[in-house]
Image (cartoon, rainbow, N blue to C red):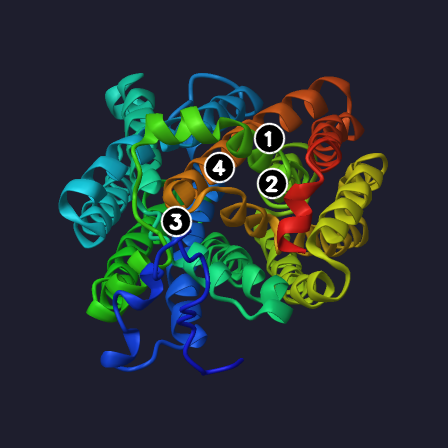
Amino acid sequence: MSTKSIGNPHADTPPGGHGRGTHGNVGTHGDIAPAEIAIGVIIGRTSEFFDFFVYAIASVLVFPQLIFSDVDRLTGTLYSFAIFALAFIARPIGSLIFMTIDRLYGRGTKLTIAIFMLGGATAAVAFLPGSDQIGKTAGVLLAVFRIGQGLALGGAWDGLSSLLALNAPEAKRGWYAMIPQLGAPLGLMVASALFAFLVSTLSASDFIEWGWRYPFFVAFAINVVALFARLRIVSTPDYQNLFESRDLQPAPVLETVTSQGRNIIIGAFAPLASFAMFHMVTVFPLSWVYLFTKQSPARFLEIEIGGGIVGFFAVLASGLLADRFGRRSVLGVSAVAIAAFSGFAPQLLNGGDVGEIIFMVFGFAILGIGFGQSSGVVAGNFTSHHRYTGAALTSDLAWLVGAAFAPLAALLLASNFGVLAAGAYLLSGAVGTIAALFINRELGQKFS
């Protein structure tokens, strides 16, 4: 990875101007290397995904029994997945609130409030009493804390991913675009390993009573550490100048939606296949195996760790493939592969260890290729003034449409019509991606 300065005085120069890239000479305090941005991006995304997977795993293994003990396990899991979706609904609202804070008080203040809010909501879940103690209030509190997580995630956007993509060398844009996505398999592996250890070493009663709470405390600690690591980067004069020179400043949300609405919608649908696939190989299979097979959750979490390793290397491969064949081609081919996967692969979850391993290996391999480039279709589609806010809103909308209801829809379909029916939701995501790439061909060409 190159360590030369990423400042480019010729990029995004306003018409007739001298270019704000020269307004703050980043070299004054020392050149900023791509590797430095990449480290900040990976730290931030890994902490967010670890938090995400801790909650997702608990939605299957803990909340149906602890919070919804008055209904059967399947119904309780469906209720858990409905609350799970609330964070994705709240996230765009969080972006609206925190973009205002960003404009008024700065990116450092916004990040500090957002990350402590995220950590606070996560830690609050760890102290949540069960329904046997406070009745239905437990479910209400869980929903409130989940909404708090979603609002905070809307404010956790730091712009480093866009900064990395915009300053990537011409021939390595695909490689740099995949770096933020490495946080997903890393977060999954750590969260799965922690829960697998607790489930396998504690009795069922101890795990439900207190064991499951520890990963939420760990998530809080990781969020705090990640906050200071990210603040150390984004709050320095060098980075403040670089954010300004690359037009990565917050614009009013309503103004951005009004002027960039088409780009936001198309940008959100382009990665739909990989975002739907994201939950189909992480959250949904754990729920299906736990509810409808004799496989132990600890064993399947170990299989998920292996899948995460495959996904990690597939994300790396996506960068090489995108630079060789173009991002549009990678997204299109991965969407077709996901469509094919949806037609037969879910049935493998009923095939014991061998079937589950095949499902996870192929699923994560396909996911990594598409997901690795899903963030790369965002930043360059916007005018420079709206790039920072537009990229955040596009990401929020993509997660809402492609991922928020994926576990709920898949489990609902599978429990009523068989596991193969869960592929219908996945197929709809693949169709959405292919349609978006076909309707707006320049989307892929701008970053290919």
Residue in the picture at 74% in, 31% down: 435
Which label lies toward us, 1 or 4? 4
Residue 406, disc: 1
Circle count: 4
Q: Name the residue type under label 1.
A: Ala
Question: Where is the C terminus found, in terms of image quarters?
Answer: bottom right
Locate residue 291, reporting x and y percent.
Answer: 62, 33
Q: Between marks 2 and 3, how big is the CA–CA gap? A: 17 Å
Locate residue 198, reporting x and y percent.
Answer: 44, 55
Q: Is residue 202 visible?
A: no
- List the residue tagged with mark 4: 394
Which label lies toward us, 2 or 3? 2
Local secondary structure at mark 2: helix
- Pointers 2 and 1 in contact (C-beta within 8 Å): yes
Local secondary structure at mark 3: helix
Q: Between marks 3 and 4, how big is the CA–CA gap? A: 21 Å
Which label lies toward us, 2 or 1? 2
- List the residue tagged with mark 3: 51
Local secondary structure at mark 4: helix
Badge 4 density bin: few <14, some 14–19, many ≥20, Cα 10 Å: many
Q: Between marks 2 and 1, how big is the CA–CA gap? A: 9 Å
Q: Name the residue type under label 4.
A: Thr
Q: Earlier in the sequence, mark 1 or mark 4?
A: 4
Picture quadrant of residue 202 = bottom left
Residue in the picture at 45% in, 51% down: 49
Badge 2 density bin: few <14, some 14–19, many ≥20, Cα 10 Å: many
Q: Name the residue type under label 3.
A: Asp
